[in-house]
Image (cartoon, coloured by chain):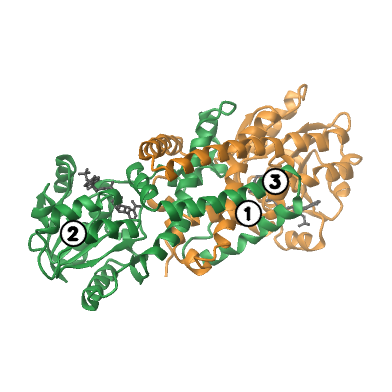
Chain colours: A orange, B green
Amino acid sequence: MYEKVALIGIGLIGSSLARAIRQKGLAREISIATRSADTLAAARELDLGDIYTTSGAEAVENADLVIVSVPVGASGAVAKEIAGSLKPGATLTDVGSTKASVIAQMEPYVPEGVHFIPGHPLAGTEHSGPAAGFAELFENKWCIFTPLPGTDEGAIDKLKAFWEACGSHVELMDKEHHDKVLAIVSHLPHIIAYNIVGTADDMETVTESEIIKYSASGFRDFTRLAASDPTMWRDVCLHNRDAILEMLSRFSEDLASLQRAIRWGDGDKLFDLFTHTRHVRRSIIEAGQDTAAPDFGRVPKKD
Amino acid sequence: MYEKVALIGIGLIGSSLARAIRQKGLAREISIATRSADTLAAARELDLGDIYTTSGAEAVENADLVIVSVPVGASGAVAKEIAGSLKPGATLTDVGSTKASVIAQMEPYVPEGVHFIPGHPLAGTEHSGPAAGFAELFENKWCIFTPLPGTDEGAIDKLKAFWEACGSHVELMDKEHHDKVLAIVSHLPHIIAYNIVGTADDMETVTESEIIKYSASGFRDFTRLAASDPTMWRDVCLHNRDAILEMLSRFSEDLASLQRAIRWGDGDKLFDLFTHTRHVRRSIIEAGQDTAAPDFGRVPKKD
Ligand SMILES: NC(=O)c1ccc[n+]([C@@H]2O[C@H](COP(=O)([O-])OP(=O)(O)OC[C@H]3O[C@@H](n4cnc5c(N)ncnc54)[C@H](OP(=O)(O)O)[C@@H]3O)[C@@H](O)[C@H]2O)c1
Ligand SMILES: NC(=O)c1ccc[n+]([C@@H]2O[C@H](COP(=O)([O-])OP(=O)(O)OC[C@H]3O[C@@H](n4cnc5c(N)ncnc54)[C@H](OP(=O)(O)O)[C@@H]3O)[C@@H](O)[C@H]2O)c1
C-alpha cells in the first residue's frame, strides 16, 4: 500500500501500528524512531520494523507515510525535527487524542507538497510502551481524521484505505467538533475516574485494603481508566483545556443538583434521573459497542 | 442445611438465591413471596421454588431461614408483615445494600427468639427481576454480615455456612462501618456514573448518536453502572444519605482542585495525581478482583 512507513514514537499505538502493518503487509519497509535508546532497544527486540534510529529526521527520509505517535504535547517539537527531511508528496499523520492543539503545533512546520492529515484512532488500553501493543488493537474501532480545508482528496483516500486495512472505520470531522466529542466521551470519563480513585485513596475511615477487597461493587470499573498513562493524560488535559473545562463545569452543576436531591430526600427526582440514563446503555449495546453479559463479560480468572 | 427457606422478594438477588439453593441442595423446601402477581407468575414459570404466594406472612410459616430481598426502603413494611408468622428459632436475614437503615426499620418488629442477622452480598449486575438471576452470582464474592451485639453465635455460623455454600466469603463488621465502606466502593461510583451519563445525554453540541458511537473511548465503562435499577438506587441514596453526602463532598472538593489545575495548566500537579492512582489498579488485579486483559477482557462480539 505504501512503500516506506516511518513511525515516530513506538509506544502502545506506534507499536500496534507496526504489528498491523507487518501482519497485513501494508508497507514494504518500516522505519522506527523513538526518543530513548531503551525504548528503541525494546522495539528492536520485538522485531517491530526494519530500520531503528533515535533520529526522527533520519527515520522519515524517503518515507511516503509518516505517523507521529507521541504524547500530544510533544507534537510541535517532533514536527520541527522531521520537517526538513520529509519527502515531497509524502503523507504526514498523527494519532494524538486532541486535534486543534496538535494542528496548531504541527501545521506551521509542514512543508509545501506534504499532505498533512491529522488523525485519531479511538482505540487504546490502559497499558503503554512497545510491549503493550497488538495488531488487533484497531479492529472494529473508529479512526477520526480532521483534515484541513483543501487537503488532497487522493491522499485522504489512501490513508483511509490504510486504516481500513488495519480494521478501523474512518470518519471525518472538523477539529473543534472532534475535541468537543472526545471531551465528553473520553476525556471527562478519564478525569472523573482519576478523581474518584484519588478520593477513595485518601479516606481515613475506610482502609485501602477494604477498597481493594470490595472493589467489585462498582469502584473497580473506574480503576481501569485511572490506570492510564499519566504523561498522555496530562498532555490531553493541557491541550484540550477549554472543551474539558466546559464538560467539567456541566458535570459539576449536575452533580450539585443530584447532591441536593439526596440531601433533601427527593426520591422522585432521583428516580427520574436514574431511569433517564438506562436507555443510553441500551443504545450502546444495540450499537455493538459493549456486551450485555454480566460483569462486562469479564473472563473469569481461572485458578 | 435448612429445612425450609422463605424468599421474600424474588428479583435478581432473590431468584439467584433460589437457583443456588436448588443447585447446591441447601434446603428441602423453598417458599417464594413477592408483591405482584406478575413477578410471582414469572418465578413460577422459571420453576424457582415449591410454594408461591403474594403473602409474605404465609411464605414464612414454618421456615427456618427467611431472606428478605426487596429494595431497602421496603424493609420495614416487609418486617411488619411477616413478624407475627415467624417461627421461633428461625433466622431472619436480608440482602439490602445499606445496613443501618435496614436494621432501624426491621429490628423493632423482630420477635423474641428469632435470630435477626442483617446481611449484604456484594454481588449484582445491572439487570433486575427474576429472569436476571443465576446460581453462580455469589461465587467468589463477599457477603457482609452486620449482626447486632448478642446475636446467637450458632445462628451466625449456620448462616455463614449457607453463604459459603453459595460460593461467597463471609465478613463481619458493624453497620456504620459497612455503610461507609459501601458508600465509597459502590454508592459513590454508581452516583457518579448516573451523573456523567446524565450530563452527556444533555449536550447540545454533541449528539447522542455520536456519544453512543464513540463510547468505547471511556464513556461506556460508566454506562453499565448507570443502567442499574432506579428503585434500588433511589432507596440506597435515601437510606445511606449521610455517608454518601460525605463521600460526595470529598469527591467534589478533589474535583474542584483538579479543575483548577487544568485551568491554570499545572502539568506537574496533573501528572502527580494521574501517577498516584495507578497502584490502586495494580492492587485490584493482584487481589484477583479484576482482569488486566485489554478492554476488561470483554468477550469480543462474534459476527
Ligand atoms: N493509549 C491510548 O489509549 C491512546 C488512544 C488513542 C490515541 N492515543 C494517542 O497516541 C499517542 C501515543 O500514545 P501511546 O499510548 O502510544 O503512548 P506510549 O505507549 O507512552 O508511547 C509514547 C511514545 O512517544 C514517545 N515520547 C514520549 N514523550 C516524548 C517526547 N516528549 N518527545 C518525543 N517523543 C516522546 C515515547 O518515546 P520514549 O519511550 O523513547 O521516551 C514513545 O515512543 C498520544 O498522543 C495519545 O494521545 C493514545
Ligand atoms: N442488584 C444488585 O446489584 C444488588 C446487589 C446487592 C444487594 N442488592 C439488594 O438486594 C435487594 C433486591 O435487589 P434486586 O436487584 O434483587 O431487585 P429486583 O430484581 O428489582 O427485585 C425486587 C424484588 O423486591 C420486590 N419489591 C419491590 N418493591 C417492593 C416494595 N415496595 N415492597 C415489597 N416488595 C417490593 C419486587 O417485587 P415485585 O416485582 O413483585 O414488585 C421483587 O420481588 C435490594 O435491597 C438491593 O439493595 C442488590
What's the CA distance linking mark 3 and mark 1?
21 Å
**Tag of residue B109:** 2
Indicate whether A42 appears above or below A86: below
Task: Work out whether residue A127 can be spotted.
Answer: yes
Element at badge 3? Answer: helix
Question: Which circle's residue, 3 or 2, is located before the other in the chain?
Answer: 2
Report the residue at 74% width, 48% height from top.
A71
Q: Mark 1 points at which residue?
A: A228
Q: Which of A1 and B10 is in front in this view?
A: B10
Q: Nearer the viewer, residue B270 or A47?
A: B270
Q: Nearer the viewer, mark 3 or mark 1?
A: 3
Report the residue at 58% width, 29% height from top.
B206
Identify the image quadrant of the C terminus of chain B: top left
Q: Does the residue labelled 1 lie within 8 Å of ligand 1?
A: yes
Judging from the image, mark 2 belongs to the subunit labelled B
What's the CA distance linking mark 2 and mark 1?
50 Å
Do the residues indicated by labels 3 and 1 lie within the same chain of the protein?
no
What's the CA distance linking mark 3 and mark 2?
51 Å
Furthest residue toward right: A84
Q: Amino acid under label 2?
A: Tyr
Report the residue at 77% width, 25% height from top.
A151
Q: Amino acid under label 1?
A: Ser
Element at badge 1? Answer: loop
Judging from the image, mark 1 belongs to the subunit labelled A
Element at badge 2? Answer: helix
Q: Mark 3 points at which residue?
A: B260
Q: Which of marks 3 and 2 is in front?
A: 2
Q: Bin the neighbour count of mark 3 within 10 Å (Cα to Cα): few under 14, some 14-19, many 20 and up.
A: few
